[in-house]
Image (spheres, helix red, strand yellow):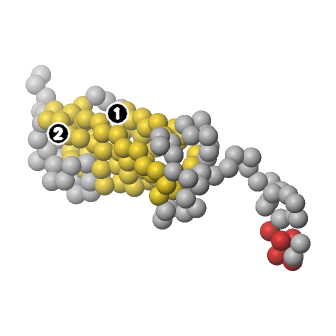
Amino acid sequence: MGVMDFFLGKSRDGPERAGAASVPMATTPVHKPFSISAKFDSLRLRTGRNGKIMMDVGVTNISPHKQLVSVDVSLPQRSNVGFDVNCNQNYVEKRVGEIMPGSTSTFSVPIFANNLTREGSYTVEINAFSHYLDYRKVLSQMRKKIALRAVSGTRRD
């Protein structure tokens, strides 16, 4: 046992750290490591000046290993629907962190419409990535597409 091993918590025949988690980190690609869920806080996005809707994205780890996860959400380009008020940004990346087996991590993403947004259906694409050691190396990826419906923002009372 060397001097650095003493400071890092390694022993001659034990685990690397005394308090190490009992669930190992994923080191090989898994075919389907996640279950992706998404829901909107209302059924439709209203076009026009104050068109905003919140989308809740949930990622559940269904593999037997803990996963280092990031999620990308994207909207069609030149659709006048976006993640900012001006509808210029149509790509968002969220670094979720480590998810234990069977656990779920949820986050919210705002989606905006403006005066140029047309009525219709828009495809929202959600990509979940499993990483190895840091966010530069990808082990596995899952993709889910959902439809967002936009309706006219004018009220007819």
Q: Position of residue 155 (x, y in %)?
A: 13, 29
Q: Which residue is mark 1?
A: 40
The picture places residue 146, in percent across and down from the top left corner, at: 29, 36
Quarter of the image where one finds residue 36: top left
- Amino acid on which the number 2 mark rests in the picture: Thr
Identify the residue shown where x is 80% and y is 68%.
8
Check disc 2 and report its element: helix, strand or loop: loop
At horizontal 46% and vertical 50% (from top left) the residue drawn is 140
Tag 2: Cα neighbours inside 10 Å, few (<14), some, or many (≥20)?
Answer: many
- 97 vs 16, left or right, is left
Q: Relative to 61, is 25 above or below?
A: below
Q: Residue furthest top?
A: 157
Q: Is residue 13 left or right of residue 88?
A: right
Can see residue 96? no
Using the image as rendered, state which of residue 19 and residue 78 is in the foreground: 19
Q: Secondary structure at mark 1?
A: strand
Answer above or below: position of 97 versus 151: below
**Between discs 1 and 2, the one toward the N terminus:** 1
At horizontal 87% and vertical 76% (from top left) the residue drawn is 2
Q: CA distance from mark 1 to mark 2?
A: 15 Å
| Mark 2 lies on residue | 47
Packing grade of label 1 (10 A; few <14, some 14-19, many >=20) is some
* Residue placed most toward the observer, 81 or 135: 135
Left or right: 15 with respect to 117? Answer: right
Q: Amino acid at mark 1?
A: Phe
Q: Position of residue 32 (x, y in %)?
A: 47, 40
Percent x, y of residue 5: 83, 71
| Residue at horizontal 21 percent and vertical 49 percent from the top | 76
